[in-house]
Amino acid sequence: MRTVLYVGSDEQTLRRYFGHVRLLSTVNNGMEIRNHNQGKPIWLATDPVKSWDRLWPDFYRIRGWS
């Protein structure tokens, strides 16, 4: 996997894992309904520093799933 769309986090964190990170937008459900992702940034991240199977454990922790 060479390109990832990532919702949440911050640019500094994502730059540890990807060569290029660009803010595309923010989540807006258009209903002014507050939920977990409302208002979160949407990032385009490319050129990962290692394979996805090696990145996944770190992302699992970033999201707080562990």
Image (cartoon, rainbow, N blue to C red):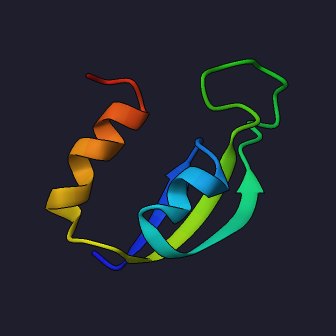
Q: Position of residue 62 (x, y in %)?
A: 41, 36
Left or right of residue 44, residue 64 in this image: left
Q: Quadrant of residue 44?
A: bottom right
Can you give x and y, in whole percent of width and height, for residue 36 in the image?
60, 23
- Quadrant in the rendering for residue 20: bottom right
Is residue 49 rendered to the left or right of residue 16?
A: left
In-front residue for pair 35/3: 3
Front residue of this view, candidates 7 and 11: 11
- From this view, report whether residue 29 is shown above or below residue 4: above
Residue 43, quarter of picture: bottom right
- Which residue is found at the position 22% from the left and 43% from the top? 57
Q: Residue furthest left?
A: 53
Where does the N terminus fall, quadrant-wise?
bottom left
Q: Position of residue 41 (x, y in %)?
A: 70, 48
Estimate the x, y position of residue 66 in percent, counting from the top left: 26, 22
Vertical placement of residue 65 versus 50, above or below: above
